[in-house]
Amino acid sequence: MADLRTTNPEPAAPHPLDPADVTPTGAPPGRRPHDAAGPIVADAPTPVDPVAGRGPAEPGEPAFAPPASLADFAGLARAALPADVWDFVAGGSGTEITLAANRAALDRVAVLPRMLAGVDTPATEAPLPGGRFALPVAVAPMAYQKLLHPDGEVGLAAAARAAGVPYVASTLASTPIEEVTAVGGTVWFQLYWLRDRAMVADLLDRALTAGCAGLMVTVDVPVLGRRLRDVRNGFALPPHVTAANLPGGRDDLAHQGTPGVSAVAVHTGAVFAPALSWADLAWLRERTPVPLLVKGILDPRDAARAAELGVDAVVVSNHGGRQLDGAPGSAAVLPEVVAAVGERCAVLLDSGVRGGTDVLRALALGAAGVLVGRPMLWALAAGGRAGAEAALALLAAELRDALILSGCADPAAARQLRTLIGG
């Protein structure tokens, strides 16, 4: 029987945020696939962005033509990318049960719209750790973005800045954190726990010095999940794509291709520490003056413990189906996590978000917002920074439509909607 649940039946007090597949088309011209505390609003467009190195289309150059929906970027990316890079981005671990479960869990959430609400032009601004943003959305941390397009992390960060949403820079970015923060906007740094504690401390210091406004520690990768597409492809990074935040030579193993072996998995196995503990999280909380987010939480008991340690947000995530195969879809456990933490910290949803309706679903289930991952890489592959800007603009338009159709004036109202699970 379907489960009719009400999320937050009484209006909740705002969380006190810490201040401190589709028809493919060809790639765009010139694409070289393997070359590779007030409201924050989108920056006004400038003729040329000297940091990102890109501006509007030059006279005579065709502007990027976006597809009809955010999810449609997948087909564009698949046409543009080498098969092994497509698999690296699109694939999950094991038999990809959890990868499929992410969509299934979201698709089981039916939202009960409110009628006669008088909503004409909804607001989309929402609070996330550290401030208010133009959308209840952040760009998820994703490694090696120059695999997808030469614009890489700088292009995607510039698109996030223009959209007025946070960009999360990965430890395994192919661009140094200092170059990413130089783009401007709000950048959070995602930290993987490394075997070398001194290197962890150095990464943290560098991120703070560079101006990162938040720290997101990923806790679900003690070892890399067995990603069979990469194993079958013998996937290795091309020479021009490096782990730019690590000291020189620390990513050599990621470039050593061997049949039947994922070089990326070999590399992470050598540098990641498998024994991350609650004591380590407490150490991070003590020395982190900016909002601290913990990504990779599925069990409500872990969420409650993280909240007790004073984190600013937990991110309900199964790493996009790339770690424990057989874990649940993230949306399936979201309501329990929200209930477990109460008002002690914010809750964000990651894994499987493919459009504005998914953002609405997450809000209705109690999340403060979402992380968007693969669609942003698809957009980057399809059109570089311009593709990423188009993707975020599409997501904003889809969310506005979803808010109007559900009778919600803003994301806060969406959190009061009722949901029918399995309906």
Image (cartoon, rainbow, N blue to C red):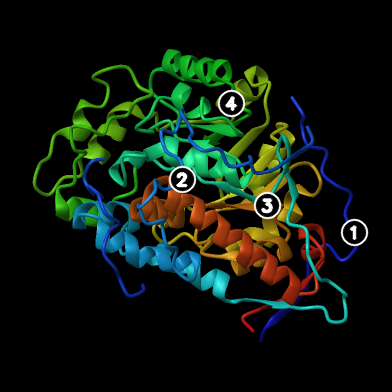
**Residue 228, x across and y down, in percent:** 24, 56
10 Å crowding of disc 3: few (<14), some (14-19), many (20+): many
Q: Secondary structure at mark 1?
A: loop
Disc 3 to disc 1, C-alpha distance: 18 Å
Amino acid at pointer 3: Pro
The residue carrying mark 4 is 212
10 Å crowding of disc 2: few (<14), some (14-19), many (20+): some
Which residue is rendered at x = 66% and y = 86% of the image? 1
Amino acid at pointer 1: Pro
In the foreground, 112 or 136: 136
Amino acid at pointer 4: Cys
In the foreground, 355 or 285: 355
Q: Is residue 332 visible to the viewer in this orientation of the structure?
A: no
Q: Is residue 209 visible to the viewer in this orientation of the structure?
A: yes
Disc 2 to disc 3, C-alpha distance: 26 Å
The residue carrying mark 3 is 136
Tell me if residue 127 comes above or below residue 405 in the rendering.
above
Label 1 vs label 2, nearer the camera? 2
Disc 2 to disc 4, C-alpha distance: 27 Å
Which residue is rendered at x = 28% and y = 62% of the image? 78
